[in-house]
Image (spheres, coloured by chain):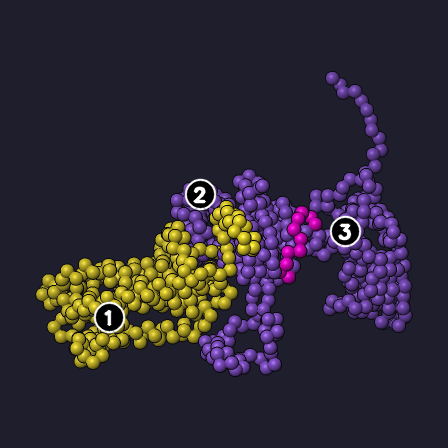
Chain colours: A yellow, B purple
Amino acid sequence: MYMNSFTTKENDMNEIEQFTTVITPKTGWLDINLKEVWKYRDLITLFVRRSFVSQYKQTILGPAWAFIQPFLTTIVFTLIFGNIAGLAPGGIPSFVFYFSGTILWTYFSNCLSLTANTFVGNAGIMGKVYYPRLVTPISTVLSQLISFAIQFCFLVAFVLYFALTKQIHPNWWILMTPVLLLQLAMLSMGFGIIISSVTTKYRDLAKLVGFGVQLWMYGSPVAYDMFSMEAFAPGGKWHTLYMCNPVTPIINIFRYGYLGFGSVEWRFYGFGWITTLVFLFFGVILFSRVEKTFMDTV
Amino acid sequence: MEELAIKIEHVSKQYRLGTIGGGTLKGDLQSWWARVRGKEDPNSKIGSNQNIKIGERFLALDDINLEVRKGEALGIIGHNGAGKSTLLKLLSRVTAPTEGRILINGRIASMLEVGTGFHPELTGRENVYMNGAILGMTKAEIEKKFDEIVAFAEMEKFIDTPVKRYSSGMYVKLAFAVAAHLDSEIMVMDEVLAVGDMKFQQKCLGRMGDAANEEDRTVLYVSHNMSTIRRLCTRCIVLDHGRLIYNGDVETAIGIYSDCQTKTQYSYDFSQQKRALGVSMNMQFLSLVIHNSPEEVIRSGDQILASIHCKANAAFQNMGIRFEIVAADGSVAGTMLSECMICAEKGQLLDIDVTIDTSHLAPGNYRFDMLAFQRNEFGVEGWCDRVSGAIQLELQKTNDSDLEWLSHYWGHTRFSDITITEVKKNMSPD
C-alpha cells in the first residue's frame, strides 16, 4: 500500500472512498472543513441558546442585565471622561455618544475574550466528544449578538429621543449597521481563535488578553472623542497610525450614522476590512491546525 | 467480503513525558534561540543527549492494526495504561494519531463519558437536545426519538426540571438514553455502565446488545468488568503496553487478560515474592513442589500431591493452611482449608506434605493463592504468610468424552453427582 506504483495507489484511493471518515495524523495547512461546520448548525443554535439561557438563570432581572452593564459604564464614562476630563465632543449629548461607543466595544471585547478561551475553557467537553471545534467560537459570537440586540434597542430609543429633540441628526449611514457588526464579529473571532490556538501550549498570552483588551479600548475612540484630539484628528500627527486600528473606523461610521457626528474615511475602512479578513483567515487556518491534537497539550 | 466498519492501519500515538515544552513561551524561545545559534539548549538537563530525548517519548499505542466488521460487538480489555482509552480517543476524533491511518464507515457516537455537555442550569428536555446535537444528531432526529429517550430513561416526571436538581443516577440514566438512541452506525463506549443501579445496567446492556444484533450497528466496548464483556461482545482484543497482543474469541482474551492462561507448573519458589502488609511472617513459605508426574495431565477429580517447604521465624502452634482458588475469569472459585495442627519451634525448617482433592473443581485454569493462618481463642484469624500463585493449575476433563464445562453458565464448582436411585416406569393412564 505504501509502494509508489500507480496501480496500488489507485487501489488505495478506491479503498478510502468506501469509508466516510479518514483519520490521519497531520493535515495540510489549508484543510478547513467548513462543510462539516454547516452540518452541525443545529448544535450552533443550541449552544447559542444554552449560553444565553444559562447566563441569566436564577437572576431576578434576567436579560435586563445585558442592558444594565453598558448603561452603568456609560454613566461612568459620561461623568469622568465627559464632565470631569472634558473628553466628550461638544454639540451632541455626551450620554448617547458614550453609549453608542460602549455597546459596540462591549460586544467586541466580550467576543474576543470569550473566543480566546475556546480551547482551554472547553477542554472538558472537547476531550470527550468530537464535533467541529469551530462551532464553539461561532456560537459564542452569535450568542453575544443577543445581548447586543437588547442594548441596541435601548440605543435606538435614546437616538429617537435625541433626534426628535433635534440634538442629533441620524442619516442613512445607519443602514451600515449589519455590515459593521459582521466585521466586528469576524475581527473579534479572528483574534480570539488565534489567541485560543496559541494558548493551548503557552498560557502566557491568556494573562495578557484581559489587559490587552483594556489597552485596545484606550486606543479606540470609545471613552473620548478622537476628533477633538489634535494628534488623532484628521490631519493630525498620529492620525494614520491611529486609524489603522480596525475598530476605529467601525465606531466612527456607527456614530456618524446614528449621531451625525464625525466623518467617514473610506480608505481606512477598507484597510480595516483587509485586516479583518487576514486575521480571520489566518485564525481559522491556525485553529484547524491546532484542533486535532490540542487535547494532548492543553 | 464482509463490509468493514472500522479499519485501523499501523496506528501509533506518541506522547511526550513530563511537561510539554518549557512550559512557558520564554523557555521555548530560549531553547529555540540556542538551537539557531548552534549552542547548547539552556533548558535541557545536564548531560542529556539525543538518545535520552528519544526515550522521553512514550508510545501509548504502538503499531495497532485492526479491522472491525459491521454489526460486530468488539470488546477491548487490558490493564490500566494499556492504551484502551487512547484508542477510543483516536476513534472518536478527540485527538489525532501520530502515525498511521484510521478509516471509518459511518457515524460514530462516542460515550467516553455520559452526560458530556450537560449544562446544570438547563432542564432535562433542553439537555437532551443539547446532548444529542453534540453527538451529531440534528434537531429533527432528536424530536423523532425524544419520547423513546425519555421513556427509556424513565424520566417522564422530571424532564422539565433543571438537571442540577437531579440525583447522579438520574443524570446518568438520561445521558445514556440519549447516547444509546442516537442513529449512529458505530457506538464507542468506555465503562459507561460503571454507574447506575443493577436494573438499569441490565437494561443498558440489553439495549447495546440489541444495537449490535438487531440493528446491525457496530459496538466497541471497553470495560474491566468481564461479565459484561462476555455478555455483550462477539470478539475481543487485548491491549498491553500499547500493543495489540490478542485478537480473537472472548474467552481466550479474558484468560490472557486475567493472567491465568499458563499451563500447570510443578515447582515454585516463593523466596523472592513480595508479601502484603499485615502478615506476621511467623511462618514463611519458601517453595512448593508438586509430585504428580508431569507426563500425565491432571484431570478433574485427581489427587494432587504436593510438598510445601517453609521456615518458622518464630515459635507457633495450631497453624493451618488455606488455598484460595481463583478461576481464569478472575472470580474466586472456592477455598480449601486444612486442619489447624502445625506446630514448630523457632528456626525449624518444615516440609509439609499435602494432598489436594480436585473432585469438586470444574475443568479449567486456576490459580491457587496459599495462606498460613492462626486462630486465637476468640476465633479471630491472624495471617502468617500469603503467597499468590502458589499453584498454577490446568485441570482437564475427567475423561475426554465428558461434557465441555461452560464455566460462565455453570460456575467453577462441580458438586457430587446426582445419585439416581430408581427409575420407575408406568404406562400413562390414557
Q: Nearer the viewer, mark 2 or mark 3?
A: 3
Q: CA distance from mark 1 to mark 2?
A: 50 Å
**Callout 2: SS:** helix
Q: Is residue A99 visible?
A: no
* Mark 3 neighbour density, 10 Å: few (under 14) some (14–19) many (20 or more): many
Q: Chain of mark 3?
A: B
Q: Amino acid at mark 3?
A: Asn
The image shows residue B136, relative to residue B369, as above or below, that is above
Q: Amino acid at mark 2?
A: Lys
**Callout 3: SS:** strand
Q: Residue at x 78, y 63 (%)?
A: B387
Q: Are marks 3 and 1 in contact (CB under 8 Å)?
A: no
Q: Residue at x 84, y 57 (%)?
A: B266
Tag shown at residue B145: 2
Q: Residue at x 44, y 66 (%)?
A: A120
The image shows residue A23, relative to residue A109, as above or below, that is above
The stretch in magenta equals B241-252
Q: Amino acid at mark 1?
A: Thr
Q: Are marks 1 and 2 in contact (CB under 8 Å)?
A: no
Quick one: quadrant of the C terminus of chain B? Answer: top right
Q: CA distance from mark 2 to mark 3?
A: 47 Å
Identify the residue position indicated by label 1 in the image.
A248
x then y, percent, for residue B313: 85, 71
Tag shown at residue B256: none
* Mark 2 neighbour density, 10 Å: few (under 14) some (14–19) many (20 or more): some
x then y, percent, for residue B302: 86, 48
Q: CA distance from mark 3 to mark 1?
A: 78 Å
Is residue B180 toward the left or the right of residue B281 in the image? left
Identify the residue position indicated by label 3 in the image.
B365
